[in-house]
Image (tube, helix red, strand yellow):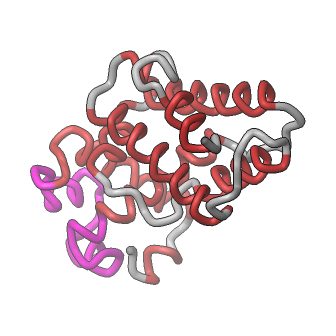
Amino acid sequence: MPLPRFDRLAPDARAAILAVARSHFARDGRDGASLNRIIADCGISKTSAYHYFDGKDDLFAAVAADTAARVLAVLGRWTSVRTADDLWEQFAAGSARLSGHLREHPDDRAVLAAAPPAPGQGGEWIAAMVADGVRIGLIDAGPGLELITAATAAVIGVADAQALARPGPALDHPGEGVPLRTLLERLWTAR
């Protein structure tokens, strides 16, 4: 992650550096992007760049974290639901917001596809959804809330990774390309 001097930069300067780097990583890939070209396009010296980051991998990690935070902001907060229909409606609306954002911001999509997800990324939203599902009787918490929440996060994470790796129906029409709702319903239901 960035060195402390980067955090002391003005927010606009940090955002500008991350935007230029995001563009390079999206276009050229994590390995193909040139740190020297990124530095030049940012209009900063090489010395300054190494005061902000330990190297290209560190810069990529900062770009990936910033991109994930921006995407999670688009997802928004989970709001409490009263029925299963409300839960699925909110889930679909969140998926649609994410899909729309990724269509409109292909650099974000490319960076997220190249970045392994951080542990717990989106965890609050998923935990709140699962807790609501248990509360309204949609989810059987018999195996334990922690295990069900982790399994739900894993299923959603795999679906997200597939959608990012090959955009198409799953990215354009949430729930159509990957039978995510069906997978979650099977996971959540006691036999």
Where in the figure is residue 95, as x and y percent of width and height? 57, 30
Report the front residue among 131 and 162. 131
* Chief secondary structure of the magenta portion: helix
Residue farthest toward the right in the current orientation of the protein: 82
Where in the figure is residue 25, as x and y percent of width and height? 24, 48
Tell me if 6 is positioned left or right of 153 in this view: left
Vertical side of 191 occupied by 11: above or below:
below
Report the front residue among 96 and 132. 132
- Asked which quadrant contains residue 191, the reply is top right
Q: Quarter of the image containing the N terminus? A: bottom left
Vertical side of 47 occupied by 189: above or below:
above
Residue farthest toward the front in the current orientation of the protein: 191
Where in the figure is residue 140, as x and y percent of width and height? 70, 49
Is 168 contained in the magenta span? Answer: no
The residue located at (55%, 43%) in the rendering is 187
Vertical side of 188 occupied by 166: above or below:
above
State which region is magenta: 31-59
The residue located at (50%, 27%) in the rendering is 99
- Asked which quadrant contains residue 160, the reply is top left
The residue located at (10%, 50%) in the rendering is 32
Is 37 contained in the magenta span? Answer: yes
Report the front residue among 16 and 148. 148
Tell me if 111 is positioned left or right of 103 in this view: left
Report the front residue among 41 and 99. 99
The residue located at (12%, 55%) in the rendering is 31
Tell me if 114 is positioned left or right of 141 in this view: left
Vertical side of 85 occupied by 118: above or below:
below
Where in the figure is residue 64, as x and y percent of width and height? 38, 56
